[in-house]
Amino acid sequence: MKTKYKYMILLHLILALYSVTGIASKFAAGEEFLSPKFILFYGIVLAGLFIYAFFWQQVIKHMPLITAYANKGVTVVWGIVWGYLIFSEEISVKKLLGACVIIAGIVLIVTADAADETAALSKDGEDNEDGK
C-alpha cells in the first residue's frame, strides 16, 4: 500500500513538471526565433519533457494505466494555478467549477478502479478456497 502512494505522489510531481513545460513553451513563443532566450526556454521544454517521459514510464509500470491516465487531467488544474501565479490570469467561477469536475472525475475513476481490483482479489481468494 505504501508503494502505491509513492507512485501516486511521483505521478503528480511529474504531471506538475509536465505543466511547467507549458509555461516555458509560452515564454519561448514570446521570443524571436532562435534567439538566446528562445533557445533557453525551448531547452527547458525539451529537458522537462525528457524527464517527464522517463518517469512516466516508471510510474505506469507500477500502477494501472487507467489510473495514471485519469490523473493526467490534473494538468488542467495546474494550468489554472500557473496562469494565476505567473501570468496574472483571473480565476473565474467557471474555471473553479471545471477544476472541481476534473478532480471529481479523477476520484471516480480511481476509486472505481480500486473497487474492481478489490473485487478481483476477493474473487481469486474464493476460487482458491474452493480448490479451483
Image (cartoon, rainbow, N blue to C red):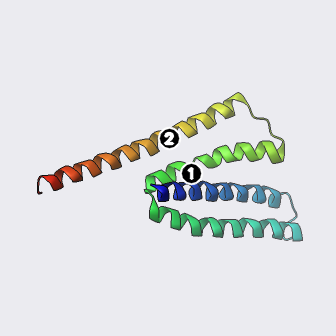
Q: Is residue 44 above or below residue 96?
A: below
Which residue sits at x=68%, y=54%? 19
**Where residue 8 appears, x then y in whole percent?**
53, 54
Cβ atoms under marks 1 and 2 closer than 8 Å: no
Residue 72 - label: 1
**Who comes first in sequence, dot 1 or dot 2?**
1
Task: Give the structural element (helix, strand or loop) at label 1.
Answer: loop
**Residue 33 or residue 75, whichever sits in front:** 75
| Residue 20 position in % (x across, y down) | 72, 56
The answer to whether 34 is drawn above or below residue 24 in the figure is below
Query: Label 2, on which residue?
Result: 107
Instruction: Say which quadrant the C terminus sits in.
Output: bottom left
Whole-number angstrom distance, CA of label 1 to CA of label 2: 12 Å
Q: Which mark is residue 13?
A: none
Q: Residue 32 vs residue 14: left or right?
A: right
Residue 1 at x, y = what percent?
44, 54
